[in-house]
Image (cartoon, grey):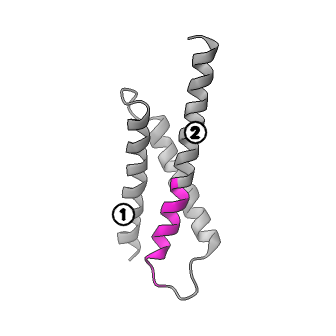
Amino acid sequence: MNNNTVDLYFQSKKASLMILAVTAIICSRLLFVFFHDPEGPNLLIVGGLTLIIYFLSQVAYLFGPSKVMGIQRLSATVGFQILLVITLYFCMK
C-alpha cells in the first residue's frame, strides 16, 4: 500500500469511529427519553451510558470479522448499538 492508500484508510477509520460516537450519544439519550421522569435524565448518567455503548461498539467494530469492510461493517455496528440499547431498556424497565 502506498502512502495515499494508508492515509485514506486511517481517515476512513477515524470517520467511522466518529459516527459510532455520535450514534452512541443519540442512542443513550433516546433510551432515557422513554422513561417518564419529570426531572429528566441526569447528564452524568447519560454520559456514562454513552461511554459504555461507544466502547462496546468500538470493540465490535475493530475486532469484528475482517471479511466485512466499509459501510457494511459500520452499519452492522450501528445495528449492534441499537440492539444493545433496546436490550438495556427492557432490562431497566
Task: Give coordinates of residue 91: x percent, y percent.
Answer: 37, 70
Is 48 placed above or below 21 here? Answer: below
Q: Nearer the viewer, residue 14 or 42?
A: 14
Tell me: 51 left or right of 83: right
Q: From mark 1 to mark 2, how far is it between C-alphas? A: 27 Å
Tell me: 8 left or right of 81: right
Classify the position of the C terminus by image quarter: bottom left
Classify the position of the N terminus by image quarter: top right
Classify mark 2: residues with Cα within 10 Å, few (<14), some (14-19) or many (20+). Answer: few
The residue singled out by tag 2 in the image is 15
Task: Give coordinates of residue 40: x percent, y percent.
Answer: 56, 81
Q: Residue furthest bottom?
A: 38
The residue type indicated by label 2 comes to Ala
Task: Give coordinates of residue 7: x percent, y percent.
Answer: 63, 22
User: Image quadrant of residue 9?
Assistant: top right
The residue singled out by tag 1 in the image is 87
Q: Secondary structure at mark 1?
A: helix
Please give the range of residues in magenta. Answer: 23-36
Is 24 colored magenta in this rendering?
yes
Q: Earlier in the sequence, mark 1 or mark 2?
A: 2
Of the residues tagged 1 and 2, which is closer to the observer?
Answer: 2
Disc number placed over residue 13 in the picture, else none: none
Q: Are marks 1 and 2 in contact (CB under 8 Å)?
A: no
- Give me the residue at 56% from left, 42% from top: 17
Q: Secondary structure at mark 2?
A: helix
- Give me the residue at 51% from left, 85% from top: 37
User: Image quadrant of residue 6?
Assistant: top right
Is 89 placed above or below 76 here? Answer: below
The residue type indicated by label 1 comes to Thr
Is 31 colored magenta in this rendering?
yes
- Give me the residue at 37% from left, 64% from top: 86
